[in-house]
């Protein structure tokens, strides 16, 4: 059997294993182990050991548990609730103000946690009932929460970009900085859409009534502002320390975790149950990602050993005669198709060992491509009929919101995200300006 055919068989076996519903790391690690032993015998047993040492020696990986802990501490202690109440009061008087406040909440949660699931859970449990109670259109607000939560995999500290950096061998610090402006741009586009639509159709997002606005005194507003500024201050301080070079990436994550704990203690929110929930959830998510990275490294090593990357390069460029931009568009399309069935982690593990070397060979910047990959994952999350976020929302939404409502709700936001993706493809400096400004010294 030729190595090309072996690579195809390995790839298809992994897809089949994932479709069985097995855990991602178990499916991928199993396929890697079986093919390694089949190809190179018992000597291939060193591959997972080597991958483990690589993982344990990768110092930036320490940021993963730190940022996950920070996000869960702020969430479990109720500080995220304070943040939403602040947005609720300060943005409520404008058309669609509570929906705009929800987008701002999602941006903040993304910067705290780096996981889209966290933003979805908080948005569905805190924001959605409040928006529905105040007469907001159920279809629009369902789309707001899904689209806003998808920002969690783009805005630092994005866990997905950590995984991309590990698998693609790219600096996580530059990837995070590359995600800042695109993430804020997406959030601004969402806000502009909500405001314009609610201006044209006031029934979609009515502002707070005069009576309710009058019920909040200036002192109440300032108190809420102070409560909301605390978690935002943690994020800004971490970013400032890192960008000025005062701390490394790992040290910044430790500062964030420590400050989140101090703020929760200062507000009297640390209890035995809060600490237990925070530690258990942080440990569970961290271990899951560590196992996934370990399986991905082993799979990538076997795949590289088969020469699969070079075979794909020859197929696209020599046999099919595609231009570099045509190859890039095919890659983005494949993400959207896979995103209908798989989550971002599985997609990354499947395609990163194939696509990243090809991207570099085609002359594209791998940091810029990491942002494109992440945005395309966001689009795939929201693409009917099988987008990942669609089913999360269906599980969390109240009974009056049906599956067809969820499908309809995301269409405007998918179009906005495609527009943003095209802008970043046409103007790469949207993603690259900040990392180049910070890391390239005169």
Image: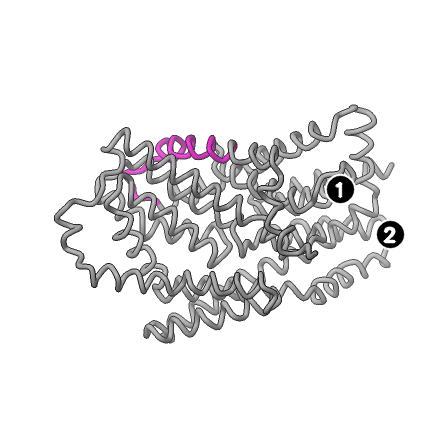
> Extreme front residue here?
442
Image quarter of the C terminus:
bottom right
Colouring method of the image: one colour
Report the residue at 34% width, 72% height from top: 269
Please, what secondary structure does the residue beneath circle 2 have?
helix
Sort mark 1 into few (<14), some (14-19) or many (20+) by Cα contacts within 10 Å: few
Q: CA distance from mark 1 to mark 2?
A: 29 Å
Numbered mark located on residue 360 in the image: 1
Q: Main secondary structure of the magenta part?
A: helix
Q: Is residue 271 left or right of 39 when viewed as pictured? A: left
- Which residue is tagged 2? 40
Residue 374 covered by magenta stretch: no
Side of 234 where 329 appears, left or right: right
Q: Is residue 323 above or below residue 361?
A: above
| Image location (x, y in percent) of residue 309 | 79, 40
The x and y percentages for residue 102 are: 35, 47
Give percent across and percent down for residue 439: 66, 56
Mark 2 Cα-neighbour bin, 10 Å: few <14, some 14–19, many ≥20: few
Q: Disc 1 on helix, strand or loop?
A: helix
Q: Is residue 144 left or right of residue 295?
A: left
Q: Where residue 334 appears, x then y in whole percent?
A: 63, 33
To which quarter of the image does residue 118 belong? bottom left
Using the rendered view, name the quadrant where residue 131 is placed: top left
- In the rendered structure, which segment of residues is drawn in magenta? 397-418
Looking at marks 1 and 2 on the same chain, the residue that comes earlier in the sequence is marked by: 2
Above or below for 178 versus 223:
above
């Amino acid at each position: 059997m030729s190595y090309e055919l072996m690579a195809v068989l390995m790839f298809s076996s992994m897809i089949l294993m994932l479709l069985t519903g097995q855990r991602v790391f178990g499916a991928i690690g199993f396929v890697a182990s079986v093919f390694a032993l089949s190809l190179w015998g018992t000597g291939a047993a060193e591959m997972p050991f080597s991958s483990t040492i690589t993982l344990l020696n990768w110092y930036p990986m320490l940021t993963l548990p730190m940022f996950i802990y920070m996000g869960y501490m702020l969430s479990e202690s109720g500080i995220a609730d304070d943040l939403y109440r602040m947005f609720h009061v300060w943005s409520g008087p404008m058309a669609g103000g509570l929906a705009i406040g929800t987008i701002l909440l999602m941006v903040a949660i993304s910067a705290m946690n780096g996981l889209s699931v966290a933003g979805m859970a908080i948005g569905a449990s805190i924001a959605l009932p409040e928006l529905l109670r105040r007469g907001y259109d159920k279809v629009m607000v369902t789309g707001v929460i899904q689209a806003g939560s998808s920002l969690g995999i783009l805005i630092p500290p994005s866990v997905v970009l950590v995984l991309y950096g590990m698998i693609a061998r790219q600096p996580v610090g530059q990837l995070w900085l590359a995600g800042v402006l695109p993430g804020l741009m997406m959030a601004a586009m969402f806000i502009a859409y909500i405001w314009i639509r609610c201006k044209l159709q006031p029934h979609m997002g009515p502002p707070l009534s005069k009576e309710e606005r009058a019920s909040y005194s200036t002192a109440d507003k300032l108190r809420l502002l102070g409560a909301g500024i605390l978690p935002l201050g943690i994020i800004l301080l971490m970013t400032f320390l890192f960008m000025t070079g005062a701390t490394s990436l790992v040290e910044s994550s430790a500062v964030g975790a420590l400050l989140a704990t101090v703020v929760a203690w200062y507000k009297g929110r640390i209890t035995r149950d809060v600490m237990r929930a925070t530690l258990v959830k942080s440990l569970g998510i961290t271990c899951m990602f560590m196992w996934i990275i370990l399986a991905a490294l082993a799979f990538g090593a076997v795949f590289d050993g088969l020469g699969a990357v070079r075979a794909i390069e020859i197929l696209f460029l020599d046999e099919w005669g595609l231009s570099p931009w045509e190859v890039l568009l095919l890659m983005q399309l494949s993400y959207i198709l896979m995103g209908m069935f798989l989550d971002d982690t599985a997609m990354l593990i499947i395609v990163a060992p194939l696509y990243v070397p090809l991207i570099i060979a085609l002359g594209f910047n791998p940091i810029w491509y990491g942002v494109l990959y992440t945005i395309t994952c966001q689009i795939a999350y929201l693409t009917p009929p099988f987008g990942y976020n669609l089913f999360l929302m269906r599980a969390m939404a109240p009974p009056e919101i049906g599956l067809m409502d969820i499908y309809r709700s995301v269409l405007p936001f998918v179009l906005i995200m495609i527009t943003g993706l095209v802008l970043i493809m046409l103007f790469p400096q949207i993603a690259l300006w900040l990392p180049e400004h910070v890391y390239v010294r005169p």
